[in-house]
Amino acid sequence: MKLGIIGAMQMELENLKPSIKNQSMETISGIEFINGEIDGVEVVAAVSGIGKVFAAVCAEIMIIHFGVDHVINIGVAGSLVKDLKVLDVAVAQSAVQHDMNTTALGDPAGLISGINIVNFEADKDLNKAVTEVLSARGIAYQTGIIASGDLFVDTDRQRNNIHVKFDAIAADMEGGSIAHVCFINNVPFTLIRSISDADGSTMDYNTFAGKAAEQSIAIVLDVIARIK
């Protein structure tokens, strides 16, 4: 196995670096990739950058250039359901791109033309390892659909629209495009999202970001120990 780890925040990569042995660095298309191994598993880790294009570029480079055959994407997302709170975790059963819209042509919302896919299914074995880790750590989580788009979802109207249209539990800006790239390259993936905002949240972002980065890396390291 050669595992690609794509992060959303630089502090996630910084937290992961001490665990990566025999490191080598390579920058491609402005993205820094760290090649090495964790617990005997070959890994390539990178922070993709914000948005679907950066995320897709990062995932494609990992697969085509570095030859990763599994991908874990960690990051943050906004809750679309009342019982997912800040620092709870959403695990994608599947991912959609909520800003893909060719409904005027008679297509369903979110359809990716050419491959005719709306929902990209996450890998069941990777997800099993993730949920086992979350349960063992006592971290509250839900599995479901994660919806992605080049839009920061910050109004109740946007949240409700995406939830109703796609039955999604969380919204982000990268996961759907990573799932898309993995699908067309036949690479298993999982998306793990720490919830950054939810109804009634009072945690400031700086506090959240530090806790989320620490939590995400702990989850990834435990997952690697289970799947190696």
Image (cartoon, helix red, strand yellow):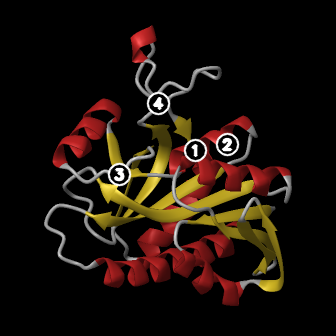
* Other residues around mark 3 within 10 Å, as few (<14) / some (14–19) / many (≥20): many
Tell me which residue sits at (57%, 62%) in the image: 49
Mark with earlier residue (3, 1): 3
Mark with earlier residue (4, 1): 4
Q: Quadrant of the C terminus?
A: bottom right
**What is the secondary structure assignment of the residue under circle 2?**
helix
Residue 134 showing in the rendered view = yes
**What is the secondary structure assignment of the residue under circle 3?**
strand
Q: Kindly report the distance in space between the C-alpha atoms of the residues bearing marks 4 and 3.
A: 17 Å
Q: Kindly report the distance in space between the C-alpha atoms of the residues bearing marks 2 and 1.
A: 6 Å
**What is the secondary structure assignment of the residue under circle 1?**
helix
Q: Position of residue 157 (x, y in %)?
A: 18, 42
Residue annotated with mark 4? 100
Tell us which disc is closer to us: 4 or 2.
Answer: 4
Q: Position of residue 104 (x, y in %)?
A: 40, 12
Tell me which residue sits at (50%, 29%) in the image: 118
Tell us which disc is closer to us: 4 or 3.
Answer: 4
Residue annotated with mark 2? 181
Disc 1 marks a residue whose amino acid type is Ser
Q: As drawn, is 121 to the left or to the right of 153?
A: right
- Vertical position of residue 110 compared to residue 102: above or below: below
Residue annotated with mark 3? 170
Residue annotated with mark 1? 177
- Residue placed farthest to the left in the image? 200
